[in-house]
C-alpha cells in the first residue's frame, strides 16, 4: 500500500517522476499506482493555487464535491496521457437512475478508475454513504454497464477511487483525518493519501482545518 503523508500545500510543479512503463502486469500496476498518487499530488497543487487566489465559499456553504471530482479526474487524465479520457455522471444501471461521479478510462494501461467524491460534513452519515459508494463501485454488473460502450479495448485493471474533503474543527473529524482510512473499515486499499493546506499564503484560520483525502481500492 502506498501512503502519502500530510504535506505542505504551497509547492508548485510536478509531484514525482515517472517510472518506466513495461508490458509486464506488475509494472503496469506500479505505473497505475504512480499515476494515481501523482494525480492526487497535482490536485493538491491546483487547489493550493486556487485557494491562494479565491475563497469559493461563504458562511457554511463549503466547497462542492464536484470541484474535487473534476480537478482530480482532469489531473489523472493529464498524468495518464492522451489515450486517457474522462466521463462524468456515467450510468451504472439501465433500469435504475444510478450514476457515478466520474470514470476515467486509459487505453494504454487497459484500465479504468471509478471516482466518487464526498464532503464529510455530517460525518457519520457521509461515512455510511462512502461505504455504500465503495460497494456500488465494486459491483460487477456495474462494471459491465460502464464498459458496455467501449470501442476496441478491454479493461484489465479497475480501481475504485474515493475522494473526501473534511473540515477538522472538531475532535472526531480530526481523528478521522489522522486515522484515514480507518473509518471505512478493513477493506484493503492500495493507496491512501491525505493533505492539508496550512502553508497557503492567504490569511485565514480556515486553512488550518481544510483537508483532502483519497483512498484507492483495486477491484
Image: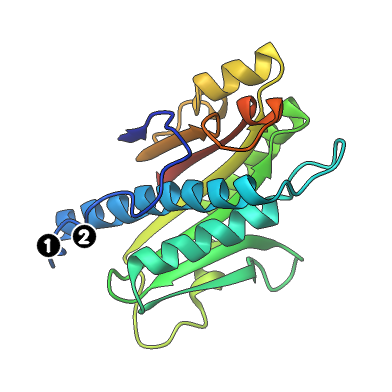
Name the residue that disc number 2 marks.
28
Q: Could you tell whether 59 is left or right of 170 in the image?
A: right
The residue lying toward the viewer, choosing from 76 and 216, is 76
Answer whether residue 140 is visible to the viewer in this image: no
Q: Specify few, some or many for label 2: CA neighbours under 10 Å numbering under 14, 14-19, or 20 or more.
A: many
| Image color mode | rainbow
Q: Name the residue: 66% across, 44% down.
A: 118
Q: Specify few, some or many for label 1: CA neighbours under 10 Å numbering under 14, 14-19, or 20 or more.
A: few
- Image spot of residue 46 (x, y percent): 52, 53
Q: Name the residue: 75% across, 66% down.
A: 96
Answer whether residue 90 is visible to the viewer in this image: yes
Name the residue that disc number 1 marks.
24
What number of labels is visible? 2
Q: Name the residue: 55% across, 51% down.
A: 49
Most extreme residue toward the top is: 171
Describe the element under mark 2 as helix, strand or loop.
Answer: helix
- Image spot of residue 129 (x, y percent): 69, 39
The residue lying toward the viewer, choosing from 158 and 45, is 45
Most extreme residue toward the right is: 59
What is the spatial separation of the Cα atoms under label 2 and label 1, in whole angstroms?
A: 6 Å
The residue lying toward the viewer, choosing from 61 and 173, is 61
Can you say whether 178 is above or below 164 in the image?
Answer: above
Q: Could you tell whether 63 is left or right of 194 in the image?
A: right
Amino acid at each position: 500500500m502506498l501512503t502519502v503523508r500530510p504535506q505542505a500545500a504551497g509547492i508548485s510543479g510536478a509531484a514525482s517522476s515517472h517510472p518506466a512503463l513495461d508490458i509486464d502486469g506488475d509494472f503496469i500496476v506500479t505505473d497505475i499506482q504512480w499515476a494515481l498518487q501523482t494525480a492526487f499530488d497535482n490536485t493538491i497543487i491546483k487547489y493550493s493555487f486556487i485557494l491562494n487566489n479565491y475563497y469559493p465559499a461563504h458562511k457554511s456553504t463549503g466547497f462542492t464535491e464536484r470541484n474535487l471530482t473534476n480537478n482530480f479526474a482532469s489531473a489523472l487524465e493529464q498524468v495518464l496521457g492522451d489515450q486517457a479520457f474522462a466521463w462524468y455522471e456515467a450510468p451504472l444501471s439501465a433500469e435504475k437512475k444510478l450514476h457515478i461521479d466520474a470514470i476515467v478510462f486509459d487505453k494504454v494501461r487497459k484500465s479504468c478508475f471509478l471516482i466518487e467524491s464526498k464532503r464529510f460534513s455530517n460525518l457519520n452519515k457521509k461515512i455510511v454513504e462512502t461505504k455504500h459508494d465503495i460497494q456500488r463501485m465494486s459491483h460487477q454488473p456495474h462494471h459491465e454497464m460502464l464498459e458496455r460502450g467501449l470501442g476496441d479495448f478491454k479493461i484489465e485493471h479497475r480501481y475504485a477511487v474515493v475522494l473526501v474533503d473534511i473540515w477538522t474543527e472538531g475532535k472526531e473529524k480530526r481523528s478521522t483525518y489522522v486515522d484515514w482510512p480507518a473509518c471505512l473499515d478493513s477493506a484493503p486499499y492500495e493507496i491512501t493519501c491525505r493533505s492539508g493546506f496550512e502553508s497557503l499564503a492567504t490569511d485565514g484560520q480556515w486553512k488550518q482545518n481544510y483537508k483532502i483525502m483519497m483512498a484507492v481500492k483495486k477491484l
